[in-house]
Amino acid sequence: MTANIAREMRWHKEQLPSDDGESMRHPADAESWKRFDEDYSWFAQNARNVRLGLASDGFNPFNNMAKPYSIWPVILVPYNLPPWLCMKDQFFMTSLIIPGPKSAGNDIDVYLQPLVDELLEFWEQGVPTYDASTKETFMLHAALMWTINDFPAYGILSGWSTKGRLACPACNEGTDANWLKYGRKHCYMGHCRFLPPDHMWRKRKNLFNGKEDHRRPPRVLEGSDIEAQLLMLGDVQFDVMHIEKNIFDNILSTLMNIPGQTKDNINSRRDLEIFGFRKELHLKYDGERVTMPHSMYTLHGEERKKFCEWLADVKFPDGFASNISHCVSVRDCRISGLKSHDCHVFMQRLLPIAVGGFLRPDIGLALTELCTFFKGLYVETKFTRVDRNIDGEAESNDGFKIFNQKVRPIGTAGNRQLSDKLLTEATWYILNNCAEIGPYLEEHYEKCRVHNPNSIDRTHHIEFPTWLKKRVQDQRITNPLDVADDLYALVCGPERWVASYTACIINGKRFHTKQRELRRRTQNSGVLVTGDENTNNVDFYGVINEIVELHYMGWRRVYLFMCDWFDVGDPRRGVRVDNHMTSINMDRTWYKDEPFVLACQASQCFYIKDIRAKGRWFVVQRYTNRNVYDIPSVPRVVEDIDGSTSDDDAYQETKESYDYAPLQCDACPVTTPLNRDDIEPILIEAQEGSSSVGQNLGVEDFIDDDMIDFGSGDASGDGENLDEEDFSTEDESLSD
């Protein structure tokens, strides 16, 4: 281990910012970390003691998915390191690889035993270790803080069954589970328990399970409660992206009505009959003819084709996501081959737009709120790091910032002359956005206020460049040392000949002109300029037409984006803003006489076709780069031994990249039917529809993870005698 890495192992204690406790930037900000430090102060005293996370899951190492095989790597992750290092593969410790061909299941304990023994040795005795940063040997201890996995793997690692009647580890014995007779699985109800006591939805029994629910939420279990059930080591963290993928797969399969994968199938409709919910979706019996009504939350025929066509045309910025259009077959109306990150992007960026264009508003809102929930689980952060899009190095760290933009132009420059109008606008914009000449701007503005009170802004705009040039030249004659070279170069103005580019990289993002990306599968021309008090906090959206490099004396350069700005001043015809997204009309432009923006001022956004509206309406998508972190730089508590310093320029992003408003509940929630009358219902085959609602399944058809012998009898009793106000679970009916 190098001295730098050894020093970074103390980052969580020496450099982690201490704020109001509201920001979660690192596991050290978590309550469990702080509580662990209080309980085991001897461990926390030495920042070099290692906090570990254990991650494991099964995967198929072969390309041929038809060949079943499951191999389980067990990886240890050191959380002492800063967030931009601890999740890099070079710091992962592959402690075990459990071979297939089948999952180890509950026998995983046998494979983990050697690892457990070593972790106990690290915890109790410690291991002598050399610290390269302090040039000393110390006794290193380690603690396993968390396991990281999806829900099924959590069941295998923890020993708590994540299936069956008590599948929720948080609710524990308070899990509200019902057995689905035809689906042959448990469903989990009782979510109204978590609402405020006076919430109106607690009384809306027709919207849920047919009962008013005034119960309190399940009691949060303490450690002593868990130990009383089973001695468990460590805590658990869930792999959000993996869980998100599983949920998305179910949503997409149901939305596209994929046979064999959709959750809206014959068995689910039969279970609805048993519970008495949503009667409009029940199977319809007409003699021997059985039909299943189409639901409002699935796409059919031409709708699926339009959805796939829209998806195939979506473009993302470079490095943001893979080319999802490769996973779409418009001809077959099929979507397949999505990876975990594709599902993540689809769930949070595409699904809210798609459901708004095809589904009823109340259904679309419910799915959009679900997407909002997952988006809130991800921390949008920012920390300047070297990435695949490396900015050009600044020529100097001193002088005017406007001459030190870190821009790397791409491609061959084209030289051209700016027209008088464009040159005047570019010069004014640069002067007006140079912070170092702020006092001159204020002085001249006050002069215009006195001498031209009827046209202050216009006079200031026209006369300031000439006034400033004369003012600085006079100062240079009388007091040459008071005029910096950058100031003199700025007031002398740029050359008329400029360099023009079609692409550049700045702030770790790749920008293209609109013309350059016409035949590309990526979209990098969208720009966003965040508003301030001078613009009434209005954000401006546009696309880049040209990237201009202006030359000043002394080899100084200024980079500008020349853009088309969309009309965000017209809330009806130009921009539409709701609680979840912002749409702009690309047929309407604004500020045609002011096309410029400094390259360093522009953030990148991209646009997705808004299928909710006719015309060229597009939804604005803001985003931050991957591998950037919101960690303000903090001086080290202890002095560095080797004298090396960090050049990372860190700053905090004060505004979230996507602001979703919470759902507002109406006094009368939507209770409209969920069946479609515009499409002929599906005719059920005689073999599939022959089972009646009150059919006996027998115990051989009952699937339960607890493997309990329930004896003979009906799995859930006669459906015809089921009381609407008293829905018993599978186990309760059997115990009777």
Image (cartoon, grey):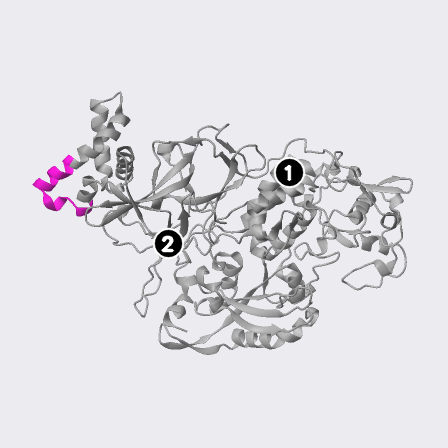
Q: Position of residue 181 (x, y in %)?
A: 82, 51
Which residue in the structure is indicated by mark 1? 358
Disc 1 residue type? Phe
Q: Quick one: SS at disc 2?
A: loop
Disc 2 residue type? Ala
Q: Position of residue 122 (x, y in %)?
A: 52, 75
Residue at 40% x, 48% y: name it.
511
Above or below 452: residue 632: below
Q: Position of residue 530 (x, y in %)?
A: 40, 39
Residue 484: within the magenta?
yes
Q: Which residues are magenta?
A: 470-486
How many other residues sit within 10 Å of disc 1, few (<14), some (14-19) or many (≥20)? many
* Residue contact at pointers 2 and 1, CB within 8 angstroms: no
Main SS, magenta region, reads helix
How many other residues sit within 10 Å of disc 2, few (<14), some (14-19) or many (≥20)? some
Which residue in the structure is indicated by mark 2? 650
The image quadrant where one finds the C terminus is bottom right
Q: Judge left or right: residue 492 versus residue 401.
A: left
Numbered tag placed on residue 148 in the rendering? none
